[in-house]
Image (cartoon, grey):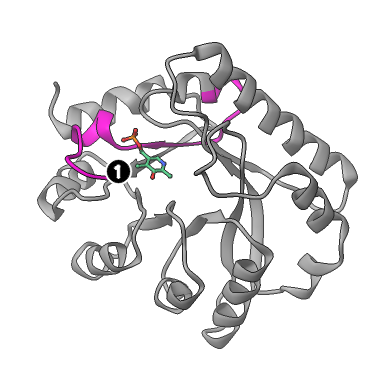
Amino acid sequence: MLTIGKQILKIGNELPKNVRLVAISKTKPIDMLMEAYEAGQRHFGENKVQEMTQKQEAMPKDIQWHMVGHLQRNKVRQVVPFVYLIHSIDSVRLLQEVDKEAARVSRVVNCLLQVHIAREETKFGFDEAELMSLINSKELSKLPFVNVMGLMGMATFTENQEQIRAEFSGLKVLFDRINATGKIHLTELSMGMSGDYIIGIECGSTLVRIGSSIFGVRNYV
Ligand SMILES: *Cc1c(COP(=O)(O)O)cnc(C)c1O
């Protein structure tokens, strides 16, 4: 495998101009993240609050931190002061909590709504009906300290490329349908990890979340 810096440049060169690379650095030590930083990487993603907070404190302040893992409401306060984008908003109650904590620190926090698109039971997220009812309700207009920018989805963990494509395409259809309501204007679609980001991009992704292809395999999730 190439070094971390070379991997960052290689993947960066493959991406269309409108697609941003989020380097998913969970479980990896700071010296490895700094290698990515030295290669020009500024968007990093983590899935645990404590780990992200510690890395944020230790690393350069021009890094944009993305929360991509399941977020508990009692941990929202810790990330709201600095997080750049929360990909994993999976309930209205969580969104309300982000708004409340963001108001406390007078900061508007960027969020994506996570949609359950995989066949697996375990993945978090809104289903289509819940999402459309949120969009059609007045709830979002009552939350001035959250900026809902788009949707995030994780495909089923499978070798079946056509299934992954069907799940990502379904999310893009939903994204377009929401924008067609005129109630909100979504610009970001977070789809694609190391194994499926090419398909994600073909289906309209604007943010790819890549970990193991940059930093190597993880021993644990
Ligand atoms: C770990 C993780 C990724 C990156 O996975 P890789 O397969 O290592 O690229 C992307 N998104 C989320 C939500 C993750 O938890």
Please tell me which residue is depicted at 29% across the width and 68% down the height of the picture. Answer: 50
Question: Would you identify the image quadrant in which residue 13 lies?
Answer: top left
93 in relation to 46, above or below: below
Residue 117, position in %: x, y?
Answer: 62, 35
Tell me residue 45's x, y (percent): 36, 50
What residue is shown at x 66% (from left), y 24% (from top)?
A: 169
- Is residue 160 shown above or below 193? above
Where on the picture, by quarter, is residue 59? bottom left
Work out whether 151 lies above or below 61: above
Q: Bin the neighbour count of mark 1 within 10 Å (Cα to Cα): few under 14, some 14-19, many 20 and up.
A: many
Residue 144: x and y in percent read 71, 74
Corner quadrant of residue 81: bottom left
Q: How many marks?
A: 1
Q: Is residue 162 magenta?
A: no
Q: Which residue is mark 1?
A: 41
| Residue at disc 1, secondary structure | loop
Task: Classify the position of the N terminus by image quarter.
Answer: top left
Residue 168: horizontal and vertical position, in percent? Answer: 61, 27
Residue sitting at x 55%, y 81%: 101
Looking at the rendering, the stretch of residues picked out in magenta corresponds to: 200-221
Question: In the depicted view, which residue is nearer to us: 81 or 115?
Answer: 115
Q: Quadrant of the C terminus?
A: top left
Q: Is residue 201 magenta?
A: yes
Q: Residue shown at 39%/76% (left/top)?
A: 78
Query: Looking at mark 1, is its residue's CB closer than 8 Å to ligand 1?
Result: no
Horizontal side, residue 202 vs residue 92: left or right: left
> Which residue appears farthest toward the front when viewing the image?
121
Q: Which three-letter amino acid code belongs to the residue tagged 1? A: Gln
Residue occupying the far bottom of the picture: 104
Q: Is residue 103 above or below residue 83?
A: below
